[in-house]
Image (tube, rainbow, N blue to C red):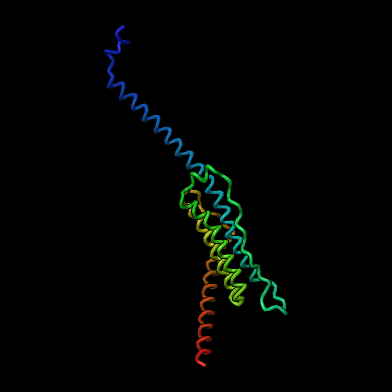
Amino acid sequence: MTWWNPLLWDWGAIGNAALGAGFGAAAVTLYRDHRQTKSQASHLAVRLAVVLEAYASSCQQFIEDNANADHEPDQEFPNWRTRLPELPPYPDDVEGWRALNLKLGERCLNLRNKITGSQSIIRATIDVDMDALGDTLDEHAASRGIEAWEIAVALRSRYGLGKSEMVWDYVEALTACRAEAIKSKDESAKARAKFMDREQKH
């Protein structure tokens, strides 16, 4: 039985075969891990996108509520809502967050900080410049809603989830509202500056 004699074996061929098998197994493992990671990220991405789209819609509802707020005859300003919509908790999915694109994950997490910052500006406006409150509420609600929508769009694009199906285009309404609020604030600031300039000259 000469076939069992190690001295007669083609160790080069055996080494190449073993090495090839090793690479093949590694490639299969890497591919399987990649598919699993992508699946985890995609699953989290669609859940995040739905949360963010709902938040954008709630921002538009906030603006509409303020546009139709009651205005008592003895009050200088309407009974506006002054607290921005709350961003719901994100899904608690550790593996999904690890698999999610880092930049998109950062944008999701930072949105909550921006909402807090906008709320601080609103509080400051209430304290020092009530005349600007209406425009400030519209600007920041629209800005945060648009940002939430843009993140959702980026998530859907990155993971091939398809476009969101909307009953009505609240994003267009948010965009128009923000532009109008910024324009109104700029015009008010210019008018105040002209008034102050005239007062100083007199």
Closer to us: 13 or 162: 13
Q: Is residue 1 left or right of residue 129?
A: left
Q: Quadrant of the N terminus?
A: top left
In the figure, residue 27 lies in which quadrant? top left
Q: Position of residue 49 (x, y in %)?
A: 54, 52
Q: Is residue 102 above or below residue 64?
A: above
Q: Residue at x 31, y 21 (%)?
A: 14
Q: Residue at x 54, y 59 (%)?
A: 113
Spot the residue most to the bottom: 202
Closer to us: 161 or 117: 117
In the figure, residue 79 lies in which quadrant? bottom right
Tell me, yes or no, if residue 83 can be seen here: yes
Q: Position of residue 172 (x, y in %)?
A: 53, 65
Q: How many labels were placed on the picture?
A: 0
Q: Position of residue 97 (x, y in %)?
A: 52, 46
Q: Residue at x 55, y 51 (%)?
A: 48
Q: Position of residue 197 (x, y in %)?
A: 50, 87
Closer to us: 162 or 72: 72
Q: Residue at x 56, y 49 (%)?
A: 47
